[in-house]
Amino acid sequence: MYKLLLCWRYLRTRYIALVCIVSVTLGVATMIVVNSVMAGFTHEMQNRLNGMLGDLIFRTRSLDGAFDADAHMAKIRQVAGDSIAGMSPTVHVPALMYLTVGGEVLPRQVTLVGIDEATYASVSEFGDYLQHPANRDQLQFGLRDGGYDVIDHQVDDPADAKPREVMRQAGWGYRRYKAMLSKDRREQEERLKAAAPAAAPAAATAATPETLDPFAAMAAENGVPQGRDFDPAAEQHTGIVLGIGICGYRMPDGSDHFLGLPGDDVKVAFPLAKMPPQITSQQYTVVDFYESKMSEYDTNFAFVPLRALQKDRGMIDPKTGVGKFTSIQIKLKPGADAAVIRDRIQEAFPAQFYQVSTWRDEQGPLLAAVQMETAVLNVLLFMIIAVAGFGILAIFYMIVVEKTRDIGILKSLGASGNGVMGIFLGYGLSLGLVGAGVGAGLGLLFVAKINEIADLLGQITGQPVFDPSVYYFYKIPTIVEPLTVAWIAIGAVAIAVLASVLPARRAARLHPVRALRYE
Amino acid sequence: MSNLPLETPAAPAAPWISPRRVSEAPRATMSRAPRPEHGPVHLGCRGLFKSYRKGALGIPVLQGIDLEVREGEFLAIVGQSGCGKSTLLHLLGTLDQPDDGEVAFEGHRIDNLPAAARDLLRNKHFGMIFQFYHLLPELSTLENILAPALIAESTLGYWRRRSVYRKRASELLDLVGLAHRAKHRPRELSGGEMQRAAIARALLMRPKVLMADEPTGNLDRSTGASVMQTLCELNRREKLTVVMVTHDPWIAGQADRTVQLVEGRIQKS
């Protein structure tokens, strides 16, 4: 009983000990904040990675792919049918994309992905990231009249997002306007070139180059339809969905700027699926943007219809009409163990030709890096608490010396060594509890108000703490895991108790007579 | 242990006498009365040796002490500073262990008991008071007096019997005249009040032997006299065995018997 009473009295009267637990408090608070933010980032990242990739990826090792996705899917279903929720074949190919901005040609290195509109939504959340509401319901590669999102639909609070006013123009209206401008410009150039005394009618000038064009034969060989002009004001090329980072960029204030819009045409060069290697180029019309908020994807992937890409790369058997694929995205039913099913499928297919991986395998290095960062940060921050432990040890030693006489008195009254030790261990425990408790409270408060604090710090320093142009999130994502908070608090309390063991042992071993005579 | 005045209706209501009244009291009341009716040997030691080490040098303090204290006796151990009288008291009270020799209590050897048993002896059977009072500064007067009970009991046990202990403590507060100081901290008390609180603390568990180490050494003559008055009253009325160490022959004169310690040996009994 006296242990409790004295612990309580020491806690209330020895403020110096409270000072030494400030570092425990700060350590605990920092660890909670760091873990919550890291967990938030990891969660967002995993969501988006998984959303883009599907659960399992079945991939041919050859870039040229393999024939007959349906047969492969049938076999996969045979091997692991009960766990599979959906499958969709795709063709992945590295490509160079050329954007034309104000007469300048900007090349971009992208991965061109041919997707099957009908089934792709069943394996990935790709559709959710599109900018046109109708495309989010059912993707189609035709250009829409308009109605693209001006406010980012993925933001929790629309007030946070900077409106993308330019997206109001996107669509057919924009395409027709651009076509009109270029037609005007072409006509003007031709008028200047002609500079003839008798101006020929426009129809005649259009007809003349057809007969005089020395490249007409070559153009015919390339498969460009001849005899009729492509009218950009009324027609579109094959549709392409670009990552928002490929033709846009975000300013530090969070506003977005675009180098092109849905309605623009882009040229894409990619290798044909044959030997010797050959490069082909195609024109596509941008029909939508997708924004997964993972800059790695948003600046890298461009999606086109599967059948068109197969055709353009020569991946269709001319006799049977069966196309090649390079990968099959697989969505698993909830609760299925991706690693087990991966191994099961891998066993059914020769490993030298096919590779099966989970989305975690795919993004292994990235996820591992994040995990390692979290681990290293935790170790470093725990060091802070350990340092606080030494502070407690030193101050406890001081308190034991100061209380030497009291320890002697207690022993003369019949208190045992263990009892005296219990006072100081209990004191350490109560300091640890107070420190960890206050620290946990502060940390949780900080996490709850982290965006407000970041804004305030940004205002004070003039330097934005959280730069949305880097992260593609508008807010700092946080997830508080109660188990993590509990472990941090338990760790801090344990350190406080451990730090008080030595002083407590010293107190327990004090000789009562010497302690009573201590001056 | 039920022989305290608190439970005896015939006992005086307030045995504590203020220092002023003590100093004015006739000397005859403080003089030693012959007490031949002492009981059997209660506490004793035989061939007690104790020395302190100072580096390689051993400083002998006690050099073969034989002593017997009878039940109900008031024994004073006198001697000059450094003659070993406090050490002897500490050995009798099991606060320290002898190099050689034995200490016995009620016929049983106690110096070689395990630590837990010696803790129990000090808690239940011996009451101790010191020259510097040795109250715990964090606790109030009442809590200081309750300290032996707090040490003896577990949290739950104390909680169950708290009313018994509190009643006992408030009776002792009344006995030593500190009822109005129950909530005060030791630093708010005078020297005499602190020593009276220490006496009350020593009596809480109804000990069989009260050991006092220079109980008046830090008090002025009149305050010291009133403290002595309390000790004498306890000895006479409750038949409490008292072993007191002092260097003051006037204080020692109030005991039944005096033992002179010179250079670690008993000179006369």
Image (tube, coloured by chain):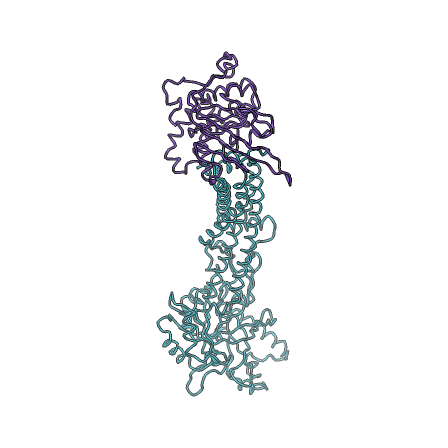
Percent x, y of residue B34 = 47, 17
Residue A202 placement: quadrant: bottom right
Q: Which chain is purple?
A: B
Percent x, y of residue A466 = 55, 55
What residue is drawn where x is 54% and y is 52%? A382
Name the quadrant of the N terminus of chain A. top left
Q: Color used for chain A?
A: cyan
| Apparent side of residue B262 relative to residue A65 in the rendered image (left or right) | right
Percent x, y of residue A456 = 56, 48
In front here: A492 or A56? A492
Q: Residue furthest left?
A: A82
In front here: A45 or B153? B153
In the rendered image, the vertical position of residue A285 relative to residue A218, given as above or below: above
Q: How many labels were placed on the picture?
A: 0
In the rendered image, the vertical position of residue A478 relative to residue B18, given as above or below: below
What residue is drawn where x is 40% and y is 27%? B168
| Apparent side of residue A1 relative to residue A25 in the rendered image (left or right) | left
Residue B155 placement: quadrant: top left
Residue A226 in view in this figure: no
In front here: B205 or A143? B205
In front here: A489 or A173? A489
Percent x, y of residue B209 = 46, 28
